[in-house]
Each structure stands twice: as C-alpha cells, then as structure tokens.
Amino acid sequence: MDSTRVTEHPTSHERRQPSAARPTAPADPRGALLRTPEPPVQGAPGLPAQGRHADTPGSPGAVGMPVPDGQDPIGAPVTADAQGAATGAPAGSGPEHSQPSATEPATEPDPHRPRPEAMGAASGAETSVHLGGKDRRTGTGQSPAPGAPMPMRRDGDRLRFVGAATRRIARGIDLDEIVMGLCRATVPTFSDAILVYLRDPLPVGDERPTGPVVLRLRRTDRIPEDRDTEGFLLPALQPEPDVGITAELCTVRPGGALNEVLRGVRPVFADAPAARAALPELIGDDLTVPGGQRAILAPLRGRRRVIGAALFLRRPDRPAFETDDLLVAAQLATHSALGIDKAVLYGREAYIADELQRTMLPETLPRPTGVRLASRYLPAAETARVGGDWYDAIPLPGSRVALVVGDVMGHSMTSAAIMGQLRTTAQTLAGLDLPPQEVLHHLDEQAQRLGTDRMATCLYAVYDPVAHRITIANAGHPPPVLLHLGGRAEVLRVPPGAPIGVGGVDFEAVELDAPAGATLLLYTDGLVESRLRDVWTGIEQLRERIAATAALTGPDHPPPLEALCDEVLDMLGPGDRDDDIALLAARFDGIAPSDVALWHLDPEDAAPGRARRLARKALSRWDLEELTDSVELLVSEVVTNAVRYASRPVTLRLLRTDVLRCEVGDDVPQLPRLRQARATDEGGRGLYLVNKLARRWGATRLSTGKVVWFELNHS
C-alpha cells in the first residue's frame, strides 16, 4: 500500500470506512510533527505543561499579560515563536510540509514488526495503536462504541487527520462554507460536538472595531444521541444555534476570564483554571460541559486579532482528550480563523464590486411617453462581477428617448471605470440633443483622451414616438434585432462602423421605421459570441429564439418584455458565459396622430392669445374641458416668455397620453430659471405659476434653441 496516500476521516454525515481500508501511517520521520513532545530537559525550552502556561509570566500567550495601549482587547500580537507553539509547528510550516515527497520510495510496513519509535519521542515510551479497539502489542483493550471517534494514539493518525481536516476547511470560499467545513471535519472523528463562536460584526482587514467585543454562536454540530448522559450539554446540542440550548450572544468583558483565555491564543482544557471561569461566560451559567479533559476551548485568531472561539466536546463515556489533541485543536483553529479572515475580505471585495457595478448602471429605467423598457445585466462570472458592458435609456425633448448599449474591452475594474466615464459622457451629449452620429464621434474623442488602448463598441439609437421612426448609429457593435407585431424577427441592417477609440473615422446614421407594437432588442456580444460559436451564428440563434417566443403569444399579442428578456437569456448554454451581458428591450407603443396637436406661432404680441384659443379647441376635441383654465393660463405664460426673445416662429405642441403634455420651443438657447419675484417687479411670476400648477415641468436645450414643457394630470 502506498504510504503517501492520505484519506479523510468520516464525519457525522459520511459513512465510516472499515478499519482494513484505512491506510497505514507513513514511517517518514517527518510525521513526528504532532507526536507527544519529549519531556523538556532542564535549561532547554519546551512546550509548557497544560494548565500552567496560562499562569507562567512572560510566556507567549500567557493569561494576564498586559495589553499595550490602543491594542484590541483580544487582539494582542503574537510572535512567530508563539504562533509556532500555538499551532504545534515551526513558523512557516504546516501539514503540507510534513507530507512525504512524491519522489521518495513508499514501502508497505510489515504489520508483524513493531513500528520504530518516532524521532523526538521520549525514551522508552510506547506508542499504542488501536485498530478495532485492541492494542496491537498487548492484544487487549475495549472496542469503542459505534459512532464514537476512533482514538488517535499514533502521531501519524493525528497528522493524517489534520491534513484531511485542513483540506476540507480550505475548500470553503465563503464564511458559512468554512465554518461548516470545520464542523464536518471534526465531528465525530475528533470530537462528539463542536460550538463555533464568531465576533459580531466580524472585523474586515485592518479596521479596528469600536465598542465591546461580542461573540455570536455561528454554528453547532454533534453526534446524534438519544440516551441520557447525566444532564450534560451534549445531548441537547442541535445543528442550528437558535434552539436556545446555549447563549447565542456573549459580550467579552475587558479583563474577564474569557478575554484572558482569548488573549492567550492557545487552546486549553476545560479543567484549566482559566477555562473553568471562562466557559460560563461563553455558554451561560445554566449549562455545564463534561468534566476533566473532555472539552477544549480554542481561540480562533486571524491575521491580526482573535475573531472567535471553538469549543470541542466529548461525552463523559468517551475517551478524554490527550495533551497532543491541544496541538490538533490549535491547527484546526488556526486554519479556520485564517480562512474566515480571507472569506470576510472576499465578501467585502464582492460587495464593493457589486456596488460599483450597480452605481454605474441605471438603478431604474425611465418611463418615457410611447415606449416601454426592460433590461438585464449578467457579469462574466461570480468571481468577476464588474465589467465594461452598459446600457442606458435617456429621455429627450419632444417625448423622444435615446437607447444606448455599449461594451468596453475586458471585464475588470479598469473596464468598469472606463465604462462609467463613457456612460457619463453619453448622457451629457444626449442632453445636448446631438444627432446619434455626433454622439459617437464625441465618445470616440473622449476614449482617445482616456488612453491609447481604450477601446469600446457602442450603439446609439433615438426613438421618436410621434413620427414612429428610429435613428441608429453604430460603432462596431452587433446589430439590433427588431421583432414585429406579427411575430417576424429581423436583424436590422445598420452600418457597422469602427469601434470607439480608433480615431479618425466617421460614423453614419440610418433612419428606420418603428411601427407601433414592435420590439427592439439591443445587446452586447457576450449574449451571442462564445468559444463554441461565432458572433453571426449567435445572432441568428438569437433571432430564431425571439421569433419562437413571439409565436407562443400569437401574432396580435407581443410577448411581455420581462418574459422576453428571460427567454433570451435562457438560450445561453453551459459554455456560453465568456463575457458580460447587457440587454435592453424597448416596446414601441408610439403616439397616435390624433393625440398630437402642433402649431407654429409668429413671435408677435398676438401670439399668446392665439395660443390660448388653439389650446382650448384641442382640449374640447379631446374631451378635456376640465383642464381648460389651467392650460390657458400656463400656455399664455410660457408663450409670452418665448416670443419676448425669439426671432423665429415659436412651436406649440400638445400631446395626449396618460398625461397632457405641452411643449413650447424657440430659437433662444438660454434656459429660464425659477426665481422669486419681488413685490415691485412687473414680471418673473410666469414660471412660478407653472411650478405651482403643473404636475412636472422642465426646460431642455436643443441644437437649435430650447424647449420648455409641462405636464398636467387628466382623468
């Protein structure tokens, strides 16, 4: 049998292997890492005896040592020598350093020959090996009860257990997985039950928590047992901490017994003086633990401070812990604490990444007139939650809306930062009401200012619900897909253009029909391109998927937007997630011509009166006479301000949708500002009335001037 083979001991959730199948301990002398230490020679350093190290002044981790000013109450620094003693290994060593090398010959030990004594063991000491409950040398002994942990009498047994347990703990990537790995690895192989306490809240990185140190019972685990065990804590243990079997919260009092044990870093038996006073503070005064050396209290120390404690328990009818088991508990506590520290840091980084991505994407989509919107965003993977894909919907003057989707090269923090700058630039350019091709041109200039290798693709479209038209300009982005009301899906023919950041290229815009009931789908290449398919194959599969989804609802009823987005994402297979995915769907409802009234007014003194008469007729035609007084007053004020400074005809447009919207446009770029007029002023009260009577109002600068608008509710 290969002596280098390492197996995990069974836990309470796994079937125990037969004793014949368990591997034999390696004869490599390096397996003496966890052996019983040789009694210290006078004058030579040695491991302090259990129960006395806490009282030995000057020893690392000694109970009662003073804490420097400003230091965490339970975060006293530990030297490299002390840490090595706490874990039972020299500094820089661990279970992985004590495994036999793959290049060393592995021999099958002779079961009939006595095993040679380990290097460093006490002279004349005999190592008892228990297999099946009998001593291999004497043939005597009692077989352990079913479900009980096998006594680890050999140092090789402990070494293999620590190696398997630490590997199981290291598999976890988040806090719950690591704590559960510790519980499953120790029960029932090492202990009959375990309680794991962690600080609440857990400190992150170098931050120094303020206030008292509070420990919360994070998880418990035990061997199921039905029979009575003299009222000890173990029979009442349950896998969840909320059954009231022990105190769920524990405040560590400065200078208290529990604080001193945690500062000592090293695990201690329950019968140690310090532990006897600390356990009631941890688990409560009404509960007891098995006496003698059947309980180990092990502080969990992370990189800079103690972050919790683990309590290992054995029933009174089971073999008690041995002195070497303190070293095993120290190894388990150290690996668990370091893993918890890393899990907390990883959780904080994931939280920061999520917040960064969330702030750079629209929190909510607007609800512009004549169009309905839905969106989705998927990161490339759980470990890469930020990327350069983005989408946006920007309301424009005249009830129009700009639809934007883009993709910065890569999916990293740098890509996300560049994406945020480009998205902000696109919003600013959209507010200037520039044509789509001009917006892409300025985005290209901005990308060149950010760096020579800042590349991105972008598609910018402007939808006009009154004209039922859409204008699209493309910068190296995959073409959009248009789903017609009858169920036909087509890939729009849009000039591809060069990506943003290339420089020195022109962008071309095309104007297409956008009939009512149609749905436009904008997406990034992560949806259609992967290692398993090229981009055009993916686009064709996307078109077929959209058409198949529309066929389910019939030709007269387009599929709901949210359900359509979910169906589109379902086309992704297991190997299709190579990049971020941004998806924006727009359903064109449009505004019927009968709900639009448009007039051009000459900039003269009679214009306000004419505007009132035209508005009154339109409201009468739409059966909105209840709004006549408010509309006449507000239209008169806004038109008066427009004709006072305009040199070209002023436009007046009324739109009837779920609200009544009035828009007045002129050729003056200066935007009006709301101000409080003084009692002696002759003007300055027009916008004050608009602000008081209108549901919403605003002013937007255009390339040819500005437009002032307001909205009123109607029944």
Image (cartoon, helix red, strand yellow):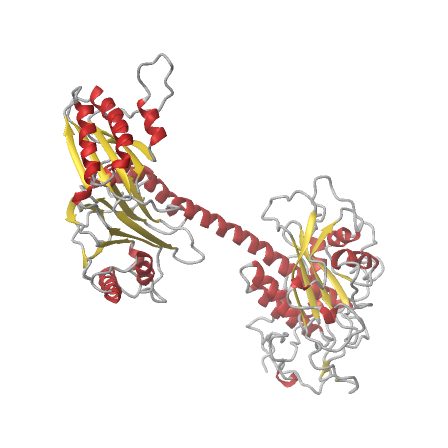
Is 207 left or right of 448, judged from the image as shown? right
Q: Is residue 105 above or below residue 92?
A: below
* Closer-to-camera residue (148/655): 655
Q: Is residue 700 visible?
A: no
In the picture as drawn, the residue positioned furthest to the top comes out as 680
Image coords of residue 244 (percent x, y): 70, 62
Is 230 positioned to the left or the right of 568 in the image? Answer: right
The residue positioned farthest toward the right in the image shown: 42
Q: Could one spot residue 371 in this view of the protein?
A: yes
Task: Establish if 336 lies above or below 226.
Answer: above
Q: Number of marks in the image?
A: 0
Residue 71's image quarter? top right
Find residue 20 and report its horizontal and vertical position in percent. 64, 85
Q: Is residue 100 left or right of residue 426?
A: right
Q: Residue at x 64, y 76 (%)?
A: 26
Q: Quadrant of the C terminus?
A: top left
Q: Quadrant of the N terminus?
A: bottom right
Q: x, y (%) of residue 450? A: 33, 39
> Which quarter of the figure has residue 119?
bottom right
| Residue plotted at (18% across, 54% down) | 492
